Image (tube, rainbow, N blue to C red):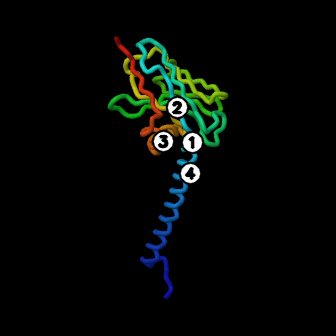
Amino acid sequence: MSRTSADPELNICLTLQFIMTNLLWLLHIVFSVSCVNSQISFSQSGPGTVRPGEDLTLTCKVTGASLTDSTNMYGVCLIRQSAGKGLEWLGAIYYNANSDSTATMKGRLTITRDTNKGEVYFKLTEVKPEDTCVYYCTSHAQQNTSNGCMYMIYYNRNILIHSSKRLTIFIDIL
């Protein structure tokens, strides 16, 4: 008995084959991204408490990847989360030394790096009480995407959100 494309059983088999093939590719990509990023670790440091009007410098130490090589990491991002609010991308510095920040941080956030030490410095000037947040460093996932940092947080929570790689900063208004 020959089968034609009008045969419902054949169509179901072809559809399942297509789904399984794409699922395998998707799993391969997910595990590849996870393996690459699990080799990169971040440690953060900062003062913990600052007064309004003061400057705040957060240091993100990167190990397991070069700040100047886009092979494993396109850049380093700073993200924060206020109590009861969502994540907010603040800025990033990329492997080629270009940096970018959100419009609300323009003029207040300076991003520099020391490639010999593997450190990135995020300097926030004239802090305000609303800058009281949990701050996160993360790697920028992909070249040519504006949301690469947020992708790493949402899809690799075990790397960032549920780890100790966060720093809570309090703005002391007294």
Mark 4 vs mark 1, CA separation in Å: 13 Å
The mark lying in front, picked from 4 and 2, is 2
**Amino acid type assigned to the residue bearing label 4 in the image:** Ser
Quadrant housing residue 145: top right
Q: Earlier in the sequence, mark 4 or mark 2?
A: 4
Q: Earlier in the sequence, mark 3 or mark 2?
A: 2
**Rendered image: mark on residue 32:** 4
Q: Residues within 10 Å of mark 2 (few under 14, many from 20)?
A: some
**Rendered image: mark on residue 142:** 1
**Rendered image: mark on residue 114:** none
Q: Earlier in the sequence, mark 4 or mark 3?
A: 4
Mark 4 vs mark 3, CA separation in Å: 14 Å
**Which quarter shows the C terminus?**
top left
Instruction: Write down the residue under mark 2.
Output: 43
Instruction: Write down the residue under mark 3.
Output: 159
Q: Is residue 23 above or below residue 5?
A: above
The mark lying in front, picked from 4 and 1, is 4
Q: Is residue 89 above or below residue 72?
A: above
Q: Residue at x 43, y 38 (%)?
A: 161
Q: Is residue 65 above or below residue 108?
A: below
Q: Where is residue 17 drawn, in percent x and y?
A: 49, 69
Residue nearest the viewer, comparing 155 with 170: 170
Query: Quick check: 151 left or right of 132?
Result: right
Q: Are marks 4 and 2 in contact (CB under 8 Å)?
A: no
Q: Is residue 82 above or below residue 174?
A: below
